[in-house]
Image (tube, coloured by chain):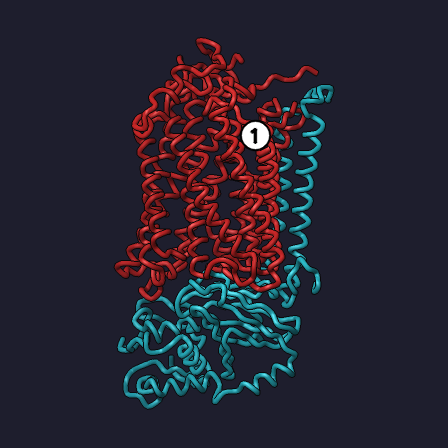
Chain colours: A cyan, B red
């Protein structure tokens, strides 16, 4: 659909399908609005007061048939739209298993992007065509909105938790990145571009922008610098959970209940360890809120995820 | 007209005891208990607020003529759209039809002497004026730039303290709403004339009743929410701000639990007005009376269960989104029922096109576009792309301005002779109605295209490729601004030079037309007795 002036460029799998959904919505609108306009115009002309000879005999009085008719017709059309819209929405919330994770942190008024191999960008995101990407996003301050019109996708980015957004780019090019949730004075300036590249070009871009280490390696350095290993390390005398193989495991909480050790749980355990501590360990972990940035937390999470699972009792 | 029993046929000359000349001092107005005078006080107040909010909109549209923002800096721009939203929602749209035409017409339509609680009615107006003053002081003296939605944690952690002033003003405003709603509900239950059964009530009463239910049940939630924001702002109580252990999505849930039903507070009275005008100018009984009546109640009830559709990309659970999407389609059904019934009323009618009818026909077209594009947002995947863009701005302006403001003007022109006892220039009124219709479409239709292309709302500056649509929209807004000023001129003129209005210039049914124009303070010399159905227009002889 490139080149149609009323439509944005179509650059993701979701956008392709949304074009068809939009076309159907437009068709329904034109049909219903057309019906309303034609009926209004016809009645207003045919039954205008200055035309006393119009046939006004026996106006329809029994209204049940009509009422049930147009109510049912509206409802059936609505059900169809509901089903299609919900189905696509659900798929937009189920990333495929082969999606690459990229981390995004929003703050007033910029987007900071971290790739798993350590590349960092500001107000820019580079991805490869055809490769599903899952963005794991959080905010340092207020709510922002990650919006790429050419992908027909947006997601509000909240402080205090991770949200995700996934897409598969289908077109090489440079696209808009907007902040879609009002976030303060320079809201309109908070944006940049998403660059979709051919796979070879993307590999070259990754190599050109390589940093000292992967995100996990950066996290490992932080892990040692912050002294985490003093308690969580293999030779530690303090009773603290071992972190190898932790990611994705079910954690029994001291207060009862079970949490899966996902990105959100690991973030919470670092910043608010007293909130949902695991059962079986003394509550001695200090909070690292204020000492580490959201980007540090992401790096620490990447490090914990990278640790090989060893056989040990949970 | 044999619908009611009255002592004398009212004549066209103004009654010496009309409510307008029953005391001419300022004091007699400011301490009045007469629902009609309070309605006029409200009408003057909200007209002032409408032009304040409109002036902010004019600067916004002017600024967006160029991509870098032509007129004001980013902070001023953000303050302007905050002022526009807050003033238009709480100081114009929510009170608009209920406090003016509702106040004036409900007792007349019921054959009553006044509302059930006249003093409470006056108190509502004073609370409203107080809230308007507080809100405007906060908005203009302070630097409040959060948008009218006050999303957390922007509003408690990052906004100026003046926001608390604005929020307190909205808190006071809520009490005005609640008292007004309470007054209408009690009045409609208790003060109907003998013989005026529920199914003989004009639809305007059903619509006002539904609106009043929402006013009473939704507004307290807003009051609680703004108090919590104030508490969080000053004392750091963690409710919504995650740095204090709060949840920003909780704010959105609570805010939209009021603010989505508030959309129906704004539009339901408009639907009531249209249901009065269409039969009057088609000279025909309203088609599907009971369906229109109950669809108002259905909208009020289901409207409480759809707030989550403002949060499809906000981070609410996908399962919540599935339910809210379904309910949002469900709430659209009663609106569709109303539109089809209005059209069916025209069939085999005897239609004239005086200015109230032109506004009403404009309402049907614009509301249909606004309603249909509402379905787009109920469709989950479409909402993901279009929400928070100009598409949603266009959509709700088609409902709120194209629909609601058109209905307000329809009501103003329909009941002006009754309220003032004067006739306005019909030619100017028709011209203004047509100009408003075209100016409105030129202003807001380009915003649908802008939004689908991806321009986010609340942007002080924008990408250059969006400029052509912004220029079209701003051009339309200049026509719209002129068109809105026209009625201010010819209606004011009619007060001075307009011909005296007869009691029933439109030959309409309804008790309000059976008393003099303007009505006497006591409304009816004797309580009327109702013996016939509403909209009982004579059938044409074949």
Q: Is residue B393 above or below residue A273?
A: above
Q: Quadrant of the C terminus of chain A?
A: bottom left
Query: Residue B275: x, y in percent?
Result: 55, 30
Check the residue under mark 1 and report the chain it is in: B
Question: Which residue is drawn at the image coordinates 60% and 17% (left, top)?
Answer: B538
Label tally: 1
Picture quadrant of residue B190: top left
Question: Which residue is drawn at the image coordinates 48% and 88% (left, top)?
Answer: A213
Picture quadrant of residue B36: top left
Camera-side residue of B255 and A58: B255
Residue furthest out toward the top: B7
Picture quadrant of residue A96: bottom right
Camera-side residue of B142 and B2: B142
Q: Is residue B168 above or below residue A148?
A: above
Query: Residue B376: x, y in percent?
Result: 59, 51
Left or right of residue B230, residue A206 in this image = right
Camera-side residue of A202 and B35: B35
Q: Is residue A245 above or below residue B437?
A: below
Question: Which residue is drawn at the image coordinates 30% and 54% (left, top)?
Answer: B230
Q: Quadrant of the N terminus of chain A?
A: bottom right
- Read off the residue under disc 1: B356
Camera-side residue of B101 and A143: B101
Q: Is residue A124 above or below residue B439?
A: below
Query: Residue A199: x, y in percent?
Result: 64, 80
Question: Which residue is drawn at the image coordinates 64% and 68% (left, top)?
Answer: A11
Q: Decide: few, some or many residues near mark 1? Use Cα within 10 Å; few <14, some 14-19, many ≥20.
A: many
Q: Secondary structure at mark 1?
A: helix
Residue B185 in view of the camera: no
Residue A170 in view of the camera: yes
Query: Residue B209: x, y in percent?
Result: 43, 32
């Amino acid at each position: 659909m490139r080149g149609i002036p009323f439509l944005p460029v179509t650059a993701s799998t979701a956008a392709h399908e949304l074009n068809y959904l939009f076309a159907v919505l437009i068709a329904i609108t034109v049909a219903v609005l057309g019906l309303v306009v034609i009926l209004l115009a016809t009645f207003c002309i045919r039954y205008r007061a200055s035309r006393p000879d119009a046939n006004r005999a026996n106006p329809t009085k029994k209204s049940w048939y009509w009422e049930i008719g147009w109510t049912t017709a509206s409802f059936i059309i609505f059900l169809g739209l509901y089903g299609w819209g919900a189905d696509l929405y659900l798929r937009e919330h189920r990333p495929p298993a082969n999606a690459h994770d990229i981390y995004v942190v929003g703050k007033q008024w910029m987007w900071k992007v971290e790739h798993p191999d350590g590349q960092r960008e500001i107000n820019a995101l580079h991805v490869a065509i055809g490769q599903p990407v899952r963005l794991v996003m959080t905010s340092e301050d207020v709510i922002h909105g990650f919006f790429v019109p050419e992908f027909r996708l947006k997601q509000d980015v909240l402080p205090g938790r991770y949200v995700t957004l996934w897409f598969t780019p289908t077109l090489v090019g440079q696209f808009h990145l907007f902040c879609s949730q009002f976030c303060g004075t320079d809201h309109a300036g908070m944006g940049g571009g998403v660059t979709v590249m051919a796979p070879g070009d993307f590999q070259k871009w990754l190599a050109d922008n390589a940093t000292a280490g992967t995100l996990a390696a950066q996290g490992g350095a932080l892990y040692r610098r912050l002294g985490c290993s003093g308690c969580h390390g293999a030779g530690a005398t303090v009773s603290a959970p071992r972190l190898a193989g932790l990611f994705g495991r079910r954690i029994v909480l001291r207060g009862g209940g079970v949490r899966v050790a996902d990105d959100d749980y690991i973030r919470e355990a670092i910043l608010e360890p007293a909130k949902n501590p695991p059962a079986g360990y003394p509550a001695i972990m200090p909070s690292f809120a204020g000492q580490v940035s959201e980007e540090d937390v992401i790096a620490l999470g990447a490090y914990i995820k990278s640790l090989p699972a060893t056989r040990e009792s949970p | 007209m044999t619908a009611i029993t009255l002592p004398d046929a009212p004549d066209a000359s103004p009654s010496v005891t009309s409510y307008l000349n029953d005391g001419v001092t300022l004091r007699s107005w400011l301490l009045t208990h007469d629902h009609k005078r309070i309605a006029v006080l409200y009408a003057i107040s909200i007209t002032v607020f409408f032009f304040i909010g409109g002036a902010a909109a004019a600067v916004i549209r002017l600024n967006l003529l160029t991509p870098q923002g032509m007129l004001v800096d980013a902070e001023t721009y953000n303050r302007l759209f905050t002022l526009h939203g807050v003033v238009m929602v709480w100081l114009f749209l929510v009170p608009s039809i209920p406090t003016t035409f509702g106040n004036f017409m409900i007792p007349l339509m019921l054959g009553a002497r006044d509302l059930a609680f006249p003093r409470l009615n006056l108190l509502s107006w004073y609370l409203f004026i107080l809230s308007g003053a507080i809100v405007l002081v906060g908005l203009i003296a302070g630097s409040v730039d959060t948008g009218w939605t006050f999303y957390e944690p922007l509003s408690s952690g990052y906004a100026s303290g003046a926001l608390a002033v604005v929020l307190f003003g909205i808190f006071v405003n809520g009490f005005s709403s609640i008292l007004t709603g309470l007054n209408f509900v009690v009045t409609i239950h208790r003060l109907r004339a003998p013989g005026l059964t529920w199914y003989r009530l004009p639809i305007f009463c059903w619509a006002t009743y539904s609106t009043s239910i929402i006013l009473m049940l939704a507004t307290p939630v807003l009051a609680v929410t703004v108090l919590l924001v104030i508490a969080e702002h000053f004392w750091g109580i963690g409710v919504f701000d995650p740095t204090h252990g709060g949840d920003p999505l909780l704010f959105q849930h609570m805010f939209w639990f009021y603010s989505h039903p508030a959309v129906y507070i704004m539009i339901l009275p408009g639907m009531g007005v249209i249901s009065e005008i269409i039969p009057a100018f088609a000279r025909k009984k309203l088609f599907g009376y009971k369906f229109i009546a109950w669809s108002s109640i259905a909208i009020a009830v289901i409207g409480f269960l759809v707030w989550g559709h403002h949060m499809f990309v906000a981070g609410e659970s996908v399962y919540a989104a599935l339910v809210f999407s379904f309910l949002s389609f469900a709430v659209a059904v009663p609106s569709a029922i109303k539109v089809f019934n209005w059209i069916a009323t025209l069939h085999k009618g005897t239609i004239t096109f005086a200015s109230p009818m032109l506004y009403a026909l404009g309402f049907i077209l614009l509301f249909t576009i606004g309603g249909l594009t509402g379905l787009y947002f109920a469709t989950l995947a479409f909402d993901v792309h279009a929400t928070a863009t100009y598409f949603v701005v266009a959509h709700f302006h088609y409902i709120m301005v194209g629909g609601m403001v058109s209905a307000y003007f329809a009501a103003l022109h329909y009941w002006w002779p009754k309220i003032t006892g004067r006739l306005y220039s019909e030619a100017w009124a028709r011209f203004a109605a047509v100009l408003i219709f075209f100016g409105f479409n030129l202003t807001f239709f380009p915003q649908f295209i802008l939004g689908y292309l991806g321009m986010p709302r609340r942007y002080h500056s924008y990408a250059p490729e969006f400029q052509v649509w912004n220029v079209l929209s701003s051009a339309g807004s200049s026509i719209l601004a002129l068109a809105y000023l026209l009625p201010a001129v010819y209606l004011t003129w009619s007060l001075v030079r307009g011909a005296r209005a007869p009691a029933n210039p439109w030959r309409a049914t309804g008790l309000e037309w059976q008393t003099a124009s303007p009505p006497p303070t006591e409304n009816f010399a004797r309580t009327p007795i109702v013996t016939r159905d509403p909209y009982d227009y004579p059938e044409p002889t074949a």
